[in-house]
């Protein structure tokens, strides 16, 4: 899918891009060697996409686990800077994404709206990084001589199935609330519109996001969802637009290691919000002994 | 003494190509499960740190005997490997389990000490109950060309071992070439090593497949020449199940079935056991496993 510009540079040779997956900061092909076609709106061949296997998913979870502690230990402010940086890098590649979305069948106006919504989403969650702990943390009233407080802490490695109906925004909705809250994420991109997810991975790779914090796979949901739900080293599962039967089945697998499990419906909830961050947090409550509480005149 | 030992060169390119091919075998299902269990049974579970305490050693010994009690029918590891000061603690903890106690000795890991100290170090470990002694060769002397010194030292330590089996650590990461790995292996075997071992685990690179294959081939040459079996222990750097299976394939295809036994082949490792356990449980349940559900020590 070369643009006019590339044709000029290469003297008319059409150099098309190889779309690969994104694991641990690198762009491997799927270990399975399989691929599937993506067609444009007229049914013409557009690109080969990696048909990721369960082993690709396993490798991605290993990368995400390795990166998690370091990411959690970054200051909230630094995580915010990095997510804002993703927005900067994305903005710069605007035409790439608009071309891809239109090639996959979006109208020009729909592509433009989805792109600007995506930028907004990144800036929105960048802002939340150093604020959600204040909003959702609490100092708790207790009867003994303790200073008692609760803070949200990241749950760990999050596996996400992005919504099928969007090209770029869906993958951002899927991973950014998780990483905003100090988790690392493995996401399966939209099956219908996977091109932008891979180009988004190229944006992430140049945005100071540490390797392994965000991992992006392309492939078939029906093949991978069972493994997303049953992997014992995944701490939370988020599935966008799951069918009722899939919810039942995935919920049962996820229960094996008590994953935090969320099914979101893109038709019902399009607006971003801090609840998407908080869903992927665990509350830690600390009892800190203090001297005579009455002496301080404090109520808690 | 060492004048008659062969200095036959090793084909490095050929060795690396051969090693690459060991990684292409497909081991699945039942064969994989038995390979994983076999690898568990060949581990020398190791702790060699200045901060080791009797408590830590006791904990590791418990792990050696109870790898993962939730999975019925698992073997124990072959041995635990500790410093001489911890041998008595390990011996008491492992009583009656069949798990052997191996002790490093001879001024491990550098080996930069006098002959007297090294022999005394060995005797202390043996007296405390060590079944096996892992000695280091004097690499400085080796590189200075003082091969007879190296030979004599191994022979003297072998004598001090008495009934304990002697593993000779070449520290292949300091050897430089496969030619030297092969020559040092031949010296060690000629001087009476029961096992030859790649590394202390204290320097990088530790065990690699080309180094291990070179040593296995020296063992094979020795077996063909004399009919005597010598054991092999790669140590350090083998931390996942896949790599362990590659090593077992290499042993099987170089030395044959007789060496697929913990009397003749060992892995010196600390984190390998848990990865093998994770893969075994994965084979059983179908779900990828998390380190959170396996004992760390």
Image (cartoon, rainbow, N blue to C red):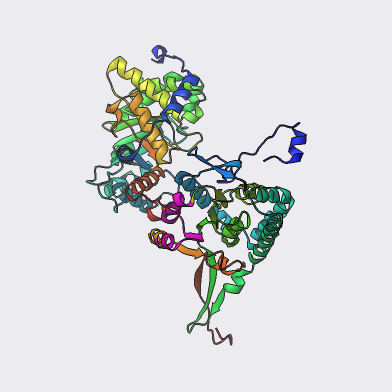
Specify whether residue A233 is painted magenta.
Answer: yes
Which residue extends farthest front?
A: A42
Q: Quadrant of the N terminus of chain A?
A: top right
Q: Is residue A122 left or right of residue B218?
A: right
Q: Which of the two residues, B80 or A173, is positioned nearer the viewer here?
A: A173
Magenta part of the chain: A221-248
Which residue extends farthest top?
A: B4
Q: Is residue B286 left or right of residue A186?
A: left
Residue visible at 55% across and 78% down in the picture = A139
**Residue A159, position as x, y percentages in the image:** 50, 56
Q: Is residue B227 left or right of residue A133?
A: left
Residue visible at 29% across and 16% down in the picture = B226
Q: Quadrant of the C terminus of chain A?
A: bottom right
Looking at the image, residue A262 lies above or below residue B37: below
Q: Which of the two residues, B46 or B261, is positioned nearer the viewer here?
A: B261
- The answer to whether residue A207 is seen in the rendering is no
**Residue A261, position as x, y percentages in the image:** 46, 63
**Residue B257, position as x, y percentages in the image:** 28, 27
- The answer to whether residue B288 is seen in the rendering is yes
């Amino acid at each position: 899918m070369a643009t006019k510009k590339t044709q000029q540079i290469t003297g008319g040779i059409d150099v098309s891009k190889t779309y690969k997956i994104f694991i641990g900061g690198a762009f491997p092909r799927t270990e399975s060697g399989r691929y599937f076609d993506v067609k444009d709106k007229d049914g013409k061949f557009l690109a080969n996409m990696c048909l990721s296997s369960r082993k690709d998913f396993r490798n991605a979870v290993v990368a995400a686990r390795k990166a998690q502690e370091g990411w959690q230990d970054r200051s909230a402010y630094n995580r915010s800077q990095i997510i804002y940086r993703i927005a900067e890098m994305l903005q710069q590649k605007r035409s790439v994404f608009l071309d891809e979305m239109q090639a996959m069948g979006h109208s020009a106006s729909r592509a433009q709206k989805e792109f600007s919504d995506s930028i907004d989403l990144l800036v929105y969650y960048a802002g939340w990084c150093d604020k959600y702990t204040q909003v959702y943390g609490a100092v708790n009233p207790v009867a003994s001589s303790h200073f008692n407080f609760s803070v949200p802490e990241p749950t760990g490695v999050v596996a996400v199935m992005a919504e099928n109906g969007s090209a770029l925004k869906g993958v951002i909705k899927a991973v950014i609330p998780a990483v905003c809250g100090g988790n690392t994420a493995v996401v399966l991109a939209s099956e219908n519109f996977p091109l932008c997810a891979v180009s988004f991975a190229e944006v992430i790779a140049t945005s100071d996001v540490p390797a392994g914090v965000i991992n992006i796979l392309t492939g078939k949901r029906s093949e991978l969802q069972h493994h997303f739900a049953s992997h014992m080293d995944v701490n939370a599962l988020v599935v966008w637009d799951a069918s009722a039967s899939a919810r039942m089945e995935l919920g049962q697998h996820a229960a094996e290691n008590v994953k935090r499990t969320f099914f979101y419906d893109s038709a019902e909830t399009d607006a971003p919000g801090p609840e998407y961050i908080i869903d992927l947090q665990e509350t830690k409550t600390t009892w800190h002994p203090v001297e005579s509480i009455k002496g301080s005149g404090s109520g808690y | 003494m060492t004048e008659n030992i062969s200095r036959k060169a090793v084909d490095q390119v050929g060795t690396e190509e051969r090693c690459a091919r060991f990684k292409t075998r497909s081991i699945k299902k039942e064969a994989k499960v038995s390979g994983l269990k076999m690898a568990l049974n060949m581990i020398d579970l190791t702790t060699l740190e200045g901060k080791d305490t009797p408590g830590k050693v006791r904990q590791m010994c418990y792990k050696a005997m109870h790898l993962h009690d939730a999975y019925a029918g698992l073997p124990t590891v072959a041995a635990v490997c500790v410093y001489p000061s911890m041998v008595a603690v390990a011996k008491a903890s492992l009583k009656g389990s069949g798990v052997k106690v191996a002790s490093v000795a001879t001024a491990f890991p550098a080996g930069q000490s006098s002959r007297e100290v090294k022999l005394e170090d060995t005797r202390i470990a043996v007296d405390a109950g060590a079944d096996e002694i892992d000695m280091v060769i004097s690499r400085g002397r080796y590189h200075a060309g003082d091969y007879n010194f190296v030979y004599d030292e191994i022979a003297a330590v072998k004598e001090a071992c008495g009934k304990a089996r002697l593993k000779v650590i070449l520290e292949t990461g300091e050897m430089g070439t496969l030619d030297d790995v092969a020559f040092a292996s031949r010296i060690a075997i000629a001087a009476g090593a029961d096992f030859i071992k790649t590394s202390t685990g204290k320097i990088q690179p530790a065990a690699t497949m080309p180094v291990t294959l070179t040593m296995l081939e020296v063992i094979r040459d020795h077996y063909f020449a004399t009919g005597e079996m010598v054991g092999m222990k790669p140590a350090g750097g083998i931390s996942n199940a896949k790599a362990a299976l590659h090593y077992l394939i290499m042993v099987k295809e170089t030395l044959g079935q007789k060496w697929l036994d913990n009397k003749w082949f060992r892995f010196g490792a600390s984190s390998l056991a848990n990865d093998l356990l994770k893969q075994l449980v994965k084979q059983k349940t179908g779900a990828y496993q998390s380190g959170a559900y396996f004992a760390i020590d």
